Image (tube, rainbow, N blue to C red):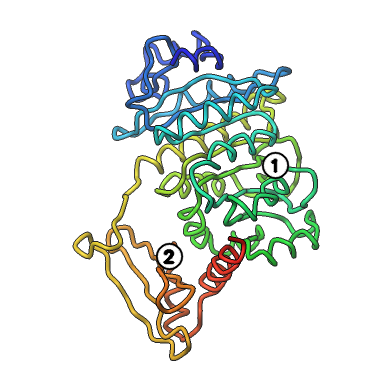
Amino acid sequence: MKQLFDILHPVPETLRKSGEGKSLSVFANVVEYLSSDSTLETAEIALIGVKNANSGNTDFVRKALYNLYLPHNCAKIIDLGDVDENELDKLRDVHTALTDKNVFVIVFGGSTDGVMACYKALESKSDFLTVTCVAPSIILGNNYLSHLFDHKASTLFNLNVIGYQNYLSEAESIKELNDNYFNAMRLASFRENTKEVEPVLRDSHALVIDMSAVRACDAPGANRHEPNGLYAEEICLLAMYAGISDNMKTAGLFGFDSSLENTQTSILTAQIIWHLIDGFARRRHENLLNNANGIKKFLINLDSPLHDLVFYHSETSERWWMEVKISGDATAYIIACSENDYKSARRHEIPLRWLWYHQKLVNRIKIY
């Protein structure tokens, strides 16, 4: 812990004491703080702020967060304080140490430059990483999307972009994502059926939220102001889905400066973090291969070279999964899916999600 103490700026004493005289379930009275006596051995969730030298936006977020009520069965949380935005290599090092201990890391504040620091902390863990970005646009230029995309031949297996707006996005960039069988979901498509994004997040290891994807009236402190975008309720729903995902290792909220108005964006950011924590507390860790655990297996014959598709359904959580094989005798990969995918197979249609995942596996084998 001494090493962390040297790297991070602990939460100010005034914020730590903000729970005095209030309910024991207020966040400020539930969370543990970084100190010389702190330990990570029992921590399940860690918060890290990214502090911009020109503003104190992390303190504004904490002020809102610390007054929220947490559920009784909440995970054990430690707020490690802040790292300076001009020292993102330190953020990567701290993040790596936390991931090594299987701690779910929530990073908030600073520009989207912090995205790659979080990604690099996961790189050594897997060469099949899936990242989901909530972003207002798709432009593969000198930005975090293009930096992530550059890892497609090494550690990045899948990149999802949710909530983008077509008129803000470059057609060539969208095509490049599609050509690599990455998933891009327009704002209108997401809004049409919000449940379809849950399987996407269930298979993701990292969630990146660019607060500019939220409409300006809900997040006026975002670095980019757009009249259209996700509603506050929708971004919180996405956060809840991400928190529930057993695969999710980290979530980052970037691209805002709540000190510009120090109220609404701070409150929304705090509520997004709350939904991440609430989702984490509801993780089920379901064993798909144990039928006694309320998991049912379905076999659907397609009368095609694929012969059949295998689906799994949890009677407890109502979630679905399906198997993807490159060939008939190959090892099956189990991926999250929706009931609509199962219904498509029942109609003897191969689900698009299956096709894209299958092609990504084929391409990855060619690379290696």
Q: Residues within 10 Å of mark 1 (few under 14, many from 20)?
A: many
- The residue closer to the viewer here, 307 or 80, is 307
Residue 322 place in picture, x, y as percent:
41, 69
* Above-or-below relation of 212 to 334: above
Q: Residue at x 34, y 68 (%)?
A: 312
Residue 239 place in picture, x, y as percent:
50, 44
* Residue picked out by circle 1: 212
Q: Amino acid at mark 1?
A: Ser
Q: How many marks?
A: 2
Mark nearest the camera among 1 and 2 is 2
Residue 235 place in picture, x, y as percent:
56, 46
Q: Is residue 72 left or right of residue 237?
A: left
Q: Residue furthest bottom?
A: 303
- The residue closer to the viewer here, 207 or 315, is 207
Residue 230 shows which numbered tag? Answer: none
Q: Quadrant of residue 193?
A: bottom right
Instruction: Tell me the distance, in whole angstroms, between the alpha carbons under discs 1 and 2.
Output: 35 Å
Q: Residue at x 65, y 60 (%)?
A: 184
Q: Residue at x 53, y 31 (%)?
A: 270
Q: Quadrant of residue 102?
A: top left
* Residue picked out by circle 2: 333
Q: Amino acid at mark 2?
A: Tyr
